[in-house]
Amino acid sequence: MPAAVAPHQTSWDRALLEQAVALAERCTPSQTAYSVGSMIADASGRLLATGFSRELGEAWHAEEVALDKARRAGLDLAGATIYASMEPCGLRLSGRKPCAQHILEAGIRRVVLALREPPKFVENEAIGRLQRFGVAVIEIPELAEAARRPNRHLLGGE
């Protein structure tokens, strides 16, 4: 793949997103937060870091975990892609920095997701914010139902 941002789905995007969706199944269920899996890959598709909601503590989001692991490993994420089973948050009721801001600060240029965040907790505007800052956002809706499964206790029959 060329160094330029691919604004469309690439050959490995689905496989990496499937792995992120599978990571969400590892989350401890919560009544106040979604269960999400996340992976970060470089422009060649090489896996750099993974994370899932609450992996490092109750308040940690999946993207935060993966980004923290990459940061601690000293990895340069400029031009990387983050895969998330659910849309990264753009607002957090806790007051913590939203995942969309973490993504922008890390220099990630692509976000691939399966499911837009349902408005159960907040109205999320992360996709629009990321796109305004030049981040390509790719949805793979065929994986949305699988991304909903670890959140069925929150979403019910939605």
Image (spheres, rainbow, N blue to C red):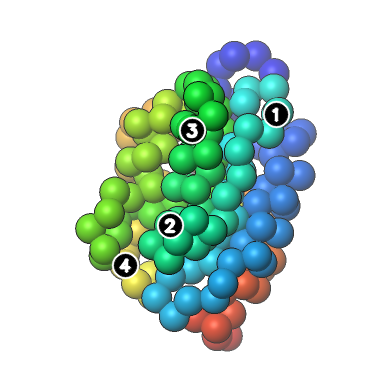
Residue 72 appears in the figure: yes
Q: Of discs 2 and 1, which sits in the foreground?
A: 2
Residue 60 badge: 2
Nearest the camera: 127 or 27?
27
**Could you say whether the residue bearing mark 4 is in a helix, strand or loop?**
loop
- Give percent across and percent down for residue 64: 44, 47
**Tag 3: residue type?**
Arg
Q: Earlier in the sequence, mark 1 or mark 3?
A: 1
Question: Which mark, by number, is residue 72?
Answer: 3
- Amino acid residing under circle 2: Trp
The Cα atoms of the two marked residues, 3 and 2, are separated by 16 Å
Question: Which of labels 3 and 4 is toward the front?
Answer: 3
The amino acid on which the numbered mark 4 sits, given as a three-letter code, is Val
User: Tag 4 or tag 3, which sits nearer the N-term?
Assistant: 3
Kindly identify the amino acid type of the residue bearing the numbered disc 1.
Answer: Gly
Q: First in sequence: mark 4 or mark 2?
A: 2
Kindly indicate whether the residue at mark 3 contacts the one at mark 1 (C-beta within 8 angstroms): no
Please indicate whether residue 56 sits to the left or right of residue 32 in the image.
right
Identity of the residue drawn at 33% across and 50% down: 98
Dot 4 or dot 1, earlier in sequence: 1
**Between discs 2 and 1, the one toward the N terminus:** 1
Q: Is residue 104 left or right of residue 137?
A: left
Q: Quadrant of residue 82?
A: top right
Badge 4 crowding class, 10 Å Cα cut-off, few under 14, some 14 to 19, many 20 or more, is few
- Quarter holding the C terminus? bottom right
Q: Which residue is mark 1?
A: 45
Going 70% across and 29% down the picture, which residue do you hit? Answer: 45
* Depth order, front residue of 1/53: 53
Q: Dots 4 and 1: beta carbons under 8 Å?
A: no
SS at badge 3: helix
